[in-house]
Amino acid sequence: MSQPVPPRPGQGAQKARLAEILRVDQAGELAAVHIYRGQQAVMRNAPGRQRIADQLGEMEGHEQVHLSRFNELLGERQVRPTLMSPVWRAAAFALGAGTALLGEKAAHACTEAVETVIEQHYAGQIAELEARDPALAAELSQFRDDELHHKDIAIGEGALEAPAYPLLSAVIRAGCRAAIKISEKI
């Protein structure tokens, strides 16, 4: 589980840390939207997969709400998005499509892995922001709850039964953690 990151000492440290938080969260929601789009692109065209395509579309809708809010926050707080956005968009779509091509359970394993990392990431940010920015901490709590719901759906749909689940999950989680660190800074 992520530990709260104390603000860096010095003038503007809290503002710089808040910029990192908003930048990485906006990037994560952008990626989530594109993972679900990639999964839907495969599932929509597969016979008998309309139910899962609809389910993925509903989860994408939740992520789009989060993304829209982070886009607003970036503008309000004058924070630039990560320069990696085009890379994350393409990589996320490819991850979504690739896991969907492996089957429904692999697509759900992707969701479970991503949401596990994001749940921990949001929890650390919420703990860090509760005293400094309680309104933002409350919004992040709601978003985290949505992510937990997605994780629960994925597990209920057989994510843990996906072929090579331990390896697939480990690779996706490592990629998410790396993207978080990169997006905070770049």
Image: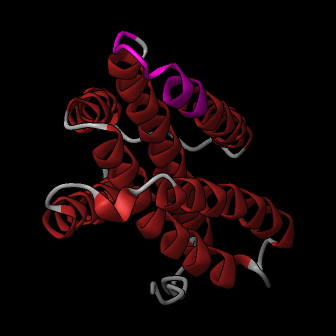
Q: Nearer the viewer, residue 33 or 77?
A: 33
Horizontal arrangement in the rendering, residue 135 relative to residue 42 (left or right) = right
Judged from this view, the residue extending furthest toward the right is 135
* 123 is higher (above) or lower (below) than 86: below
User: Which of 55/174 is in front?
Assistant: 55
Q: Residue at 69% of width from left, 55% of height from top?
A: 146
| Scheme of colours in the image | secondary structure
Residue 10 image position (x, y, % from top left)? 52, 82
Q: Quadrant of residue 145?
A: bottom right
Q: Which region of the structure is painted magenta?
A: 45-55
Q: Residue at x 70, y 43 (%)?
A: 73
Please indicate whether residue 105 sits to the left or right of residue 133 in the image. Answer: left
Measured as percent of width and height from the top left, residue 136 is found at 78, 62
**Quadrant including the N terminus:** bottom left
Res. 126 image quadrant: bottom right
Above or below for 67 versus 45: below
Q: Nearer the viewer, residue 158 or 124?
A: 158
Residue 27 is a magenta residue: no
Residue 91 quadrant: top left
Identity of the residue furthest to the top in this view: 45
Q: How many marks?
A: 0
Q: Residue 151: x and y, percent? A: 53, 60
Residue 48 spot, x, y in % from top left: 43, 19
Q: Residue at x 38, y 57 (%)?
A: 159
